Amino acid sequence: MFARTERLLLRPGWAEDAPALAKAIADEAIVRNLALAPWPYGLDEARAFLDKTADPVLPSFLLLRRTAGAPELVGGAGFGRTPGGGVEIGYWIARAHWGNGYALEAGRQLIEIARTMGLPRLEAGHFVDNPASGRVLEKLGFHPTGRTVPRHSCARGGEVPCRLFALDLAETDEVLAA
């Protein structure tokens, strides 16, 4: 699956993306805020991630900034299963691109993809020591569930408090139609 926004191309990762992926994500300040990425993160980890069989139901994307020349990898985003079985979104942005609104732009596109897929609800979470991610979720229309739960972080090697959010897509469709 591919998607395009005003500034981004969302597409699956390919084997030849490994060097750019390793360079973009190999930053402890990024990886420590992701549940599944290990630290340190290098070329071998990028290759392993890109070699995984893609989930046809819950896609993941590399985020590439569209330019007049070759697109530039700025992050990643996608869908996954929560520990409770719900569908969640996740995202990361390379440090050089923080503050440009790419997480919000990619998140909006993920919500549109979820609507197209007929999903009734999305979930998300952020580690409590990463409030910037919580602000992105709130701007996307997610609401705090009032729950903070332990979630494993591969990079940190243990459980980290994670604040949970949810977005009822049927509700947001009704609001948008009004």
Image (spheres, rainbow, N blue to C red):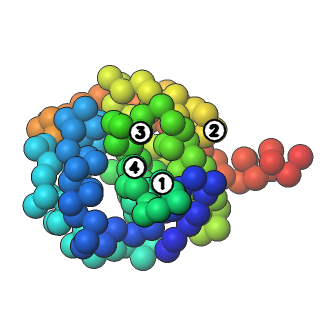
Label 4 residue SS? strand
Outermost residue on the right side: it is 178
Q: Are marks 4 and 1 in contact (CB under 8 Å)?
A: yes
Q: Are marks 2 and 1 in contact (CB under 8 Å)?
A: no
**Is 87 on the left or on the right of 34, as rendered?**
right
Q: Are marks 4 and 3 in contact (CB under 8 Å)?
A: yes
Q: Which residue is mark 2?
A: 141
Q: State the CA–CA distance, disc 1 to disc 3.
A: 10 Å
Q: Residue at x 57, y 53 (%)?
A: 7
Crowding around mark 1 (Cα neighbors within 10 Å: few <14, some 14 to 19, many 20+) is many
At which x and y percent is residue 70?
A: 43, 63
Between 95 and 124, the one nearer to me in the picture: 95
Label 1 residue SS? strand
Where on the picture, by quarter, is residue 96? Answer: top left
As drawn, 114 above or below 32: below
As drawn, 70 above or below 82: below
- Give the mark nearest the N terminus, 2 or 1: 1
Q: Are marks 1 and 3 in contact (CB under 8 Å)?
A: yes
Q: Residue at x 17, y 66 (%)?
A: 47
Q: Which residue is mark 1?
A: 65
Q: Which residue is mark 3?
A: 97
- Give the mark nearest the N terminus, 1 or 3: 1
Q: Residue 87: tell me if it is visible.
A: no
Q: Residue at x 32, y 23 (%)?
A: 129
**Is 13 on the left or on the right of 68, as rendered?**
left
Residue type at the position of mark 2: Gly
Q: State the CA–CA distance, disc 4 to disc 1.
A: 6 Å
At which x and y percent is residue 62?
A: 39, 60
Q: Residue at x 28, y 48 (%)?
A: 24
- Give the mark nearest the N terminus, 4 or 3: 4
